[in-house]
Structure formats: structure tokens, C-alpha cells
Amino acid sequence: MDSQNVVYDKNNTRCPLFLTNSDDYKCVLILTVKRVTAAFSLISCFFMLCVIWLFRKYNSLAQKMILCLTIAAFFDSIAYVMGDVHPDGVICNFQAWWLTYFDWCSLAWVCLITLNLYLNLVKEMKTDRFEVLYHLMAWGVPFVMSCLPLFRDYYGPAGAWCWITDDHVAWRFGIWYIPLFTLIFLMILCYVRIIYVAKERVLSWSGTFNPEREWRKVSLAEEIKPLKWYPSVYLLVSLFPLINRIHNAFNPLQPVFSLTLLHVISAPLHGLANAFVFGLDKDTWGQLNFTSMQLAIHSRLCDRTLIKEYRTGAVRYMPPAEASSLDLGDDDDDDTTVLFYSPAMTLKERGS
């Protein structure tokens, strides 16, 4: 969430991390690494958004939630990409609020994805009716959490970016680190339960055979495989920031360069970590080939549908130019061929 915080002196140095001159290699390296890792996350989130849009992965509730998580991580990465640390003021407060809000939004969507999967599989509940409630929680709770330090004027320069200042260490842990690791621990427990129940149901069989129910068991088991990594990657990217924060709480004027470097490497990586988990989905990964992407782009950019009146018979697909050249008049004796072209159809519907 934050980087090492020391007293900001705008007349002395633009990089107050180690109270040295702005040309000191440590300060330059910290700021450069921060921008590079944040840029990787930003590009990863943009790539995810393109894939989601291209292959229309926003139909089910779970897909919509992943889309919202990607949007939150995208805006979160923008805060980390921002330039040098600003002096205390409106711009610094806005950067700190932006960072806190979208960090919380990303975490909230990961928690809700876990909760939604738990309700679907363990409780066997249909959760589509909870979509509005999910949005209220994922965007509303972070707004409250990010505004609390703002109203108390606790935001300010905090090293490589603005956040809660070093004078309010308790707020740093209360607003972010304690809730973060508590929620990660609860999510891990949820996934342990989810995986156990999924394995039990896949191996079990009772009563009359129901193909739809058996297919649902297998599909849920496949859905769990990539999603279970979300808490793990959040734990990994948050571990070094926590260690650095604890050291900062006890030694605020003696920052450790290695800890600060590991902090700025890992903290902005939420977007890249989410993209990694997103790429673990076999269905998504299988579509990332030239043919599938070419068909999807054609479907997106050439979204024209030609439908002609037809009688019951076999169905085949033809390009618009070829279909329009055919004469399907009333005297046509061929009742076995139906022609229509729909680029808007999904790849699975086309049989590809």
C-alpha cells in the first residue's frame, strides 16, 4: 500500500526516502522500479480488459466480477505509475485517497469472488440476485475506508508515493494491513472448504443420473482451479510491504534500502498477479491463438447479421458476399439448406 515514509523537505530533495540528495542512486532506483513494476501491472490489466472484451467474457456473474476486479486493479496501477512524491497538499491527498480506494476495491472484489464461489458450490445457492449487493459492497466499503484518513487529514508524503503519514502508524495497520491479512486468512479457509466439497461431490454419486448436475460438478471443479490462487498472490505481493511497515513502525528514521526496494517491487504488482491468475483459465488460454483471435476481432469489428427467411433444414454459415449472391426465391426447391451469417455469435456457437 505504501512505501517507506520519512520527513518530506521540498527544499532539500525531491526523493525523501533516505534523506539524501535527489541524485542519490537509491532514490533514483526506488522511483524507477516503482514506475516499471506499476507499468507492467497497468499493461497486464489493459491486456485482460482487451481479452474480456474480445471474447465477451462478461456474461456470467463470475465473469462480471473478474471484469470489475480488473478495472479496479487497472486504476490502482495508475496511482503507482504517478510521478515523484508530491508535497503535502491537495494533489498528494488525492493520490493517497486514489491509492487507498482502488487497493480496497481490488481486495473487495477478490473477497466477493471467493464468497460467490463458496455460496455456489458449498451452499448450492444461485447468487445472480446478489449482483447489485456485490457492487454496493465492492465500491461502497472502500469509499468509506479511503475517506476516513482523508477527513482526519492523515494523508501526506509517504516515500515513493503519498499515503498515510508516518505520524499515524496505527491508522496504517487499522485501515489496511490488519483487514488485509485477516481477509486473506479467511479466503484461504474458504478455499480449503470449497476444494474439499468439490472433490467430495465429484467422487460421489447417488440417485438417478442427471447429466446436467454431473456436468455442473465438473465445471465448478474446473472453475475453482484458477480462482483459488487469488488469495495466494495477494498474500505474496503484500508480504514484503507488511515487513517493511513493521520495520518502519519501530525505526521510522532508519529505513532499510533492501526492504524498501522489495516493497516497491511487490506492492504495485496486484494487476500483474491478477493477470497471471486470469491466464490460468484453460478456456481463456486456449483461445489465445491466431485463429481464435482473428475470428473474435472479425466478430467484434464486423458485427453485421444477415438473416434470410428459410424453411426447416440443415444449417451452414457463409460470408455476407456469398450469401447475398444466392437466390432464395419462392420457387427454390432446395429445402435442406439454410443460409445465414452472424459474426456476433460466440466462438463456441460456431463450433470453433
Image (tube, rainbow, N blue to C red):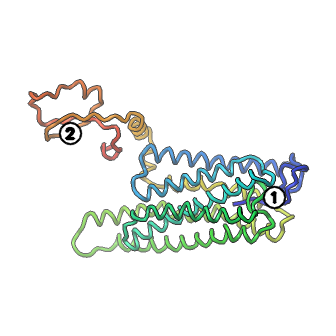
Quadrant position of the C terminus in the picture: top left
Helix, strand or loop status at disc 1: helix
Looking at the image, is mark 2 or mark 1 earlier in the sequence?
1
Residue found farthest to the top:
325
Amino acid type indicated by mark 1: Phe
Q: Position of residue 192 (x, y in %)?
A: 49, 73
Which residue occupies 74% across, 65% down?
152
Q: Position of residue 83 (x, y in %)?
A: 74, 46
Reading the image, the residue beneath label 2 is: 315
Reading the image, the residue beneath label 1 is: 257
How many residues crowd mark 1 within 10 Å: few (<14), some (14–19), many (20+)? some
Amino acid type indicated by mark 2: Val
Which residue occupies 77% across, 48% down?
84
Side of 269 where 84 appears, left or right: right
Picture quadrant of residue 207: bottom left
Q: Position of residue 77 (x, y in %)?
A: 64, 51
Cα–Cα span, label 2 and label 1: 67 Å
Tell which of 204 and 161 is nearer to you.
161
Above or below: residue 265 compared with residue 288 = below
